[in-house]
Image: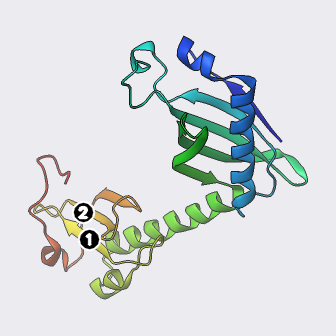
Amino acid sequence: MIHLASQFATPFHRRLATDQWLQKLRSFLEDTLVSHQEYQTADAIGSVRAAFNEDRFTGPLSLVKYDFVVELEVARLGTTLCKDQYNASLRYSPDSDTFAFKIETISTVETRAAERKKFAKVDKLVHTIESGGSRDVVDRFACPWCGGKVDVNFHPSGTVFAVYCETDGMHFSKHVEISTPPSWWRDKVSENWLDGGCC
């Protein structure tokens, strides 16, 4: 069961969010939680609000008045001390009376632990570079998120380097100041840096 508080500020959204509409949304979210094997239960408490919660976004030609944000704390089996999280941006279609996702974020105790391990691998790579590790070790490093190639670029001064996933910089991208670059740093100089050491 999902307990969902509506946090609507506009008359348009308050009129839309009838008991029937909210029940349909709760059912949609419960089905969604059940479909995600990462969650132990479909019991949650949270809120729904308009993505654009002002009157000026609710006009007859508005493209965003049916966009909503849901934030849930999802119960775990056997404990009340920690919760999983579920966040989503979704769109309601009044013509079909249905909801569809734009973006979902699944965050459980397990997924957060897995993320920490991935970032620890990136930190280990950074330490390898900072301690003058061989370029072969760096070249063999694979992105912990996708297994893709990772690249390292140095500022022409040799005082800053960037390390990132070549496949998708959203997986990770890190800029690090360094006092003593590794011996191979000049082979990895990039001219794409902005003034101040940021690329």
Furthest toward the right, the residue is 78
Residue 102: x percent and y percent? 49, 47
Outermost residue on the front side: it is 95
Residue 53, visible in the rendered structure: yes
**Residue 50 in the image: above or below residue 172:** above
User: 185 or 173: nearer the eye?
Assistant: 173
Instruction: Indicate the quadrant containing the N terminus: top left, top right, bottom left or bottom right.
Output: top right
- Left/right of residue 171 with respect to residue 8 in the rendered view: left
Residue visible at 13% across and 69% down? 189
Residue indicated by mark 1? 152
Camera-side residue of 187 and 91:
91
Q: Residues within 10 Å of mark 1 (few under 14, many from 20)?
A: many
Image quadrant where one finds the C terminus = bottom left
In depth, the one of 111 and 2 nearer the eye is: 2
Which structural element holds mark 2? strand
Residue under numbered circle 2: 161
Q: How is the image coloured?
A: rainbow
